[in-house]
Image (tube, rainbow, N blue to C red):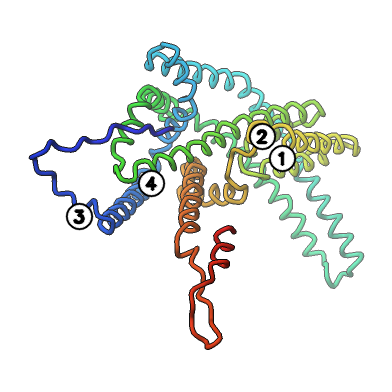
Amino acid sequence: MTFEPTPRAQAPPQGQPEEKLAPIAGRPAGRGTALAILAGFGFAIWLILQLFGPILLPFVAAFGIAYVLHPAAARLARAGLPRGIVAALLMVALIAATLLFALLLYPLILAQISILASRAPVYVGMLRDFANGLMAELQERLGPQFVDSHLRDLVSSQAGAMLSFLVGAITRVIGSGFALFNVLSLVIVTPIVAFYLLRDWPRLIAAIDSWLPRRYAEVIRAQAREVDRILSAWVRGQALCSLLLALYYATALSLVGLDLGLIVGLAAGVLSFIPYVGSITGFVASIALALAQFPTWGGVLRVIAVFVVGQILEGYVIYPRFLGDRVELHAVWVIFALFAGGAAFGFLGVLLAVPAAATIGVLIRFWLRRYMASPFYLELPPETDAEGGKTSPSPAKVASHESV
């Protein structure tokens, strides 16, 4: 999303009175107007999210699709193809790829879910036996006064109940995730809205650019280009990284013989857009399943080797190649933004978290640069003379401070 300068408004011919815009053009009134507009704009966004949050998901998804596909559409349009035909071709290709993914992976994932449901009682029994053995060992070491039979029964029963709840929750989440794609709004509304946005993207950006206040237009365009640079690098780079990691973990865990390797690998890759969450979740789930499935430590060690190699590829090959130093979003800031967006607006907040975090980060860096270049930051404290009076800083001290 780039903002190109638009022609400036021409001055009125001589002899004709200018419009009375002096109070708006003045510095105090201009700042007050800008703050009022920003406050109103922020309140309008918050109100829209509160009132129409349940129906905004297809539109936000369509905007994201149009944003990701815009560079390809722009290249094809520069080659001479009409923008409408380009948008239609890209949307058809995206729908075909989505259907191919569903046809290829959906039966395999359903088969793995059935395996998980059938083996859940076995996993519950194994966890209960492990808890009983652990409590018996604690009772032997600490004595019956610390660990009695009632506590052992409570721990074993709660361990089985916790695993049963976890398996049921995972099954419901996976099922609802696929059912989400069958919702009429996402299947029909999202591609249609994405097509229109992709077709009209240049006119949309030109319209937004024409609304910018002329006095601050260049500054706003510069910050918008910076947000676009960071956000596009993160979205496209993170999508490629998540796809490669999902393919690697799903293939490698299936090859080492883990029964639910496909589901765990895909989940670890998809969740890798949250720093450290995907790899840690996939590792813990894989180790737990390997301990329950393999009779010897050889299978567990193979699973550990898969994640060790995956971390090496992720840290030294995939992320430096597709993300590198172009993304100025710290991992802690991304994690906070995702959890804050999810807590405030649910799944819609998760989708909007990274764009909001990128925008806030750019604005904070901009105002920090302005602050560090202002007299409020650069002004030195007055020096004290021998009689206790205040004097101006010496020229040498001022020059030393400015050089720093």
Secondary structure under the numbered disc 1 in the rendered image? helix
Q: Looking at the image, tell me whether mark 3 or mark 1 is earlier in sequence order.
A: 3
Could you tell me the amino acid type at mark 4?
Answer: Leu
Q: Which residue is mark 4?
A: 49
Q: Which residue is mark 1?
A: 282
Outermost residue toward the left in this view: 15
Could you tell me the amino acid type at mark 2?
Answer: Gly
Gap in Å between the C-alphas at discs 4 and 3? 34 Å
Q: Looking at the image, tell me whether mark 2 or mark 3 is earlier in sequence order.
A: 3
Q: Looking at the image, tell me whether mark 1 or mark 4 is earlier in sequence order.
A: 4
Q: Which residue is mark 3?
A: 23
Could you tell me the amino acid type at mark 1?
Answer: Gly
Q: Which residue is mark 2?
A: 269
Residue at 48% x, 74% y is 392
Outermost residue toward the front in this view: 395
Determine whether, in the image, residue 18 is placed left or right of residue 332: left
Q: Which mark is residue 169?
A: none
* Quadrant assignment for the C terminus: bottom right
Residue at 65% x, 27% y is 109
Secondary structure under the numbered disc 3 in the rendered image? helix
Q: Quadrant of residue 316?
A: top right
User: Pointer 2: residues within 10 angstroms few (<14), some, or many (20+)?
Assistant: many
Could you tell me the amino acid type at mark 3?
Answer: Pro
